[in-house]
Image (cartoon, rainbow, N blue to C red):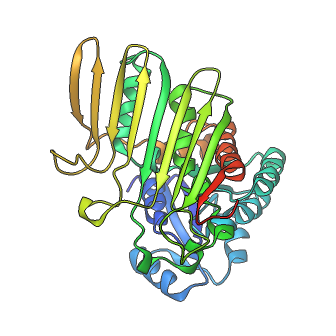
Amino acid sequence: MAESRIHFAVIGLNHGHIYGQVQALEEGGGELISFFAPEPDLASRFGSRYPKAKRASSEKEILEDRSIQLVASASIPSERAPLGIRVMQHEKDFMSDKPGFTTLAQLAEARKVQARTRMIYSIFFGERFGNAATIKADELVRQGAIGRVIQTVGLGPHQTNLKTRPDWFFKKESYGGILTDIGSHQVDQFLHFTDSKSAQVVSSQVANYHHPEQPGLEDFGDMTLRSDKATGYIRVDWFTPDGLGSWGDGRLILLGTEGYIEVRKNIDIMGRPGGNHLFLVNSKGKDYLDCDGTVLPYGKQLVDDVVNRTETAMPQAHCFLASQLALEAESKAARLGHLKS
């Protein structure tokens, strides 16, 4: 763990992503002081993992603790934005699991509060910030390895693991829809790798093809994005078969003017073990990079931002725009399969 540079707390433990968020903050120099969750089982498990952190008796106890500079959360998705707004109103920065919002109304209110308070509202887009091969791809793009990126293809397949999912997983009003939720990862990557400061949703669709017994679940979604610099295609789904041996064959393809990169985030299905695989093709030839060991900078950058009041981890405008596009794609999507239009 890095030397303590800020104190942070956790409110909301409903998704296991919280452990990756805490790890990023600790590696960046954050010290976990306290946590709160109303669910005894989730709180007990988290407390066992972090015995030095105090289990707070209420959310209010954390929000009114002046020693805490940032609050992280992986609460039920629909509860994250209201919490983030309360956190900012208490003059603390906020780090949310994705999605950071489930409605455009939530986003609009958060934008107002953030503009007034100037606190940080950051979303942990784990498929970029938590994946070494994606970070390496970013380094290569910045070095000009494939020229200017003119298209991205982001694929986010997942296993359903239905028997282990909580009730909120099946309620659209709780998770926001598949494009709002999983799709936000790929929107973030499209904007980042194409250096797009604005974009529009060209088309989108969602479906429940295979789970009619769960009418609130969207098991497939895709969208097409366009900016003044590039286009992007995104597909997300809950159809990863058990035989893969991984929760999903996450992939990112970056087409540049002088070459292309493919990132296989979790698995190389016919070859090398583990994850973090990157394939590069340009005028010099073709290459494979094992990206294990690549430093993940987000945690340190976010702590830097808390200390210095900067935007090195992720520009605030980018955070809000990625969320906006995912929400717009979800709201305008054609509804297929067992979903009603």
In the image, residue 53 sits, relative to residue 180, either above or below, namely below
**Residue in the image at 84% along x and 47% along y:** 116
**Residue in the image at 45% along x and 57% along y:** 26
Where does residue 43 sit, x and y in percent of width and height? 51, 82
State left or right for residue 294 relative to residue 130: left
- State which quarter of the image contains the C terminus: bottom right
Where does residue 174 sit, x and y in percent of width and height? 65, 70
Where does residue 293 sit, x and y in percent of width and height? 27, 43
Residue 256 vs residue 214, the one in the foreground: 214
Residue 127 at least partly seen: yes
State left or right for residue 235 relative to residue 315: left
Q: Quadrant of residue 309?
A: top right
Residue 246 vs residue 47, the one in the foreground: 246
In the image, residue 177 sits, relative to residue 226, either above or below, namely below
Residue 280 vs residue 339, the one in the foreground: 339
In the image, residue 198 sits, relative to residue 167, either above or below, namely above
